[in-house]
């Protein structure tokens, strides 16, 4: 189960790198506006906020990636701490999105499913 948890954590990290791209680099493009349900005017006026938010997603992905590297190098406690911090924060962010913007429930589910599965698999893997 630990290997499955690590795979799902890696997938969650990759998804958050993609979210970083959408929010920080492509925010005003039609693709990003469609993904987040914003108009051109809304995207233009919220560009700075989205740019900053995108970096939060990138930093969570980096924490998971660094944790995986450290875990692979034999530093299990530190590696897992970083992985759990990253995927736990991803899960919490998805819950906040769901609670604060019910119209974006689909996005919250997409954002939160991989880290939740990773959390469950890693927790089960650590118990045995």
Image (cartoon, helix red, strand yellow):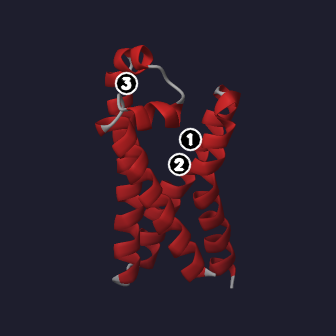
Q: CA distance from mark 2 to mark 1?
A: 6 Å
Q: What residue would you read off at disc 3?
A: 49
Residue at 38%, 78% in the rendered image: 75
Q: Which mark is residue 93?
A: 1
**Rendered location of residue 81, percent (x, y):** 47, 64
Quadrant in which residue 20 is drawn: top left
Q: What residue would you read off at disc 2?
A: 89
| Label 3 element class | helix
Label 1: how many residues lie within 10 Å, few (<14), some (14-19) or many (20+)?
some
| Label 2 element class | helix
Label 2: how many residues lie within 10 Å, few (<14), some (14-19) or many (20+)?
some
Residue at 51%, 66% in the rendered image: 9
* Pointer 2 or 3: first along the chain: 3
**Rendered location of residue 84, percent (x, y):** 52, 61
| Label 1 element class | helix
Quadrant in which residue 78 is drawn: bottom left
Which residue of the protein is positioned furthest toward the front in this rendering?
30
Going by the image, does 85 lie left or right of 98?
left
Q: How many numbered circles are shown?
A: 3
**Rendered location of residue 47, percent (x, y):** 34, 23
In this rendering, the label closer to the viewer, 2 or 3:
3
Residue at 51%, 37% in the rendered image: 35
Marks 1 and 2: in contact by CB < 8 Å?
yes
In this rendering, the label closer to the viewer, 1 or 3:
3
């Amino acid at each position: 189960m630990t290997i499955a948890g690590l795979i799902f954590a890696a997938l969650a990290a990759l998804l958050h790198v993609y979210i970083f791209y959408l929010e920080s680099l492509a925010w005003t493009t039609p693709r990003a506006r469609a993904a987040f349900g914003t108009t051109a005017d809304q995207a233009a006026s919220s560009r700075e906020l989205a740019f900053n938010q995108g970096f939060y997603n990138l930093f969570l992905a980096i924490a998971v990636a660094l944790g995986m590297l450290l875990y692979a190098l034999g530093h299990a406690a530190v590696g897992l701490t970083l992985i759990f911090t990253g995927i736990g924060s991803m899960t919490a962010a998805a819950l906040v999105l769901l609670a604060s913007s019910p119209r974006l429930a689909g996005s919250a589910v997409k954002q939160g499913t991989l880290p939740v599965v990773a959390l469950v698999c890693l927790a089960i893997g650590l118990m045995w």
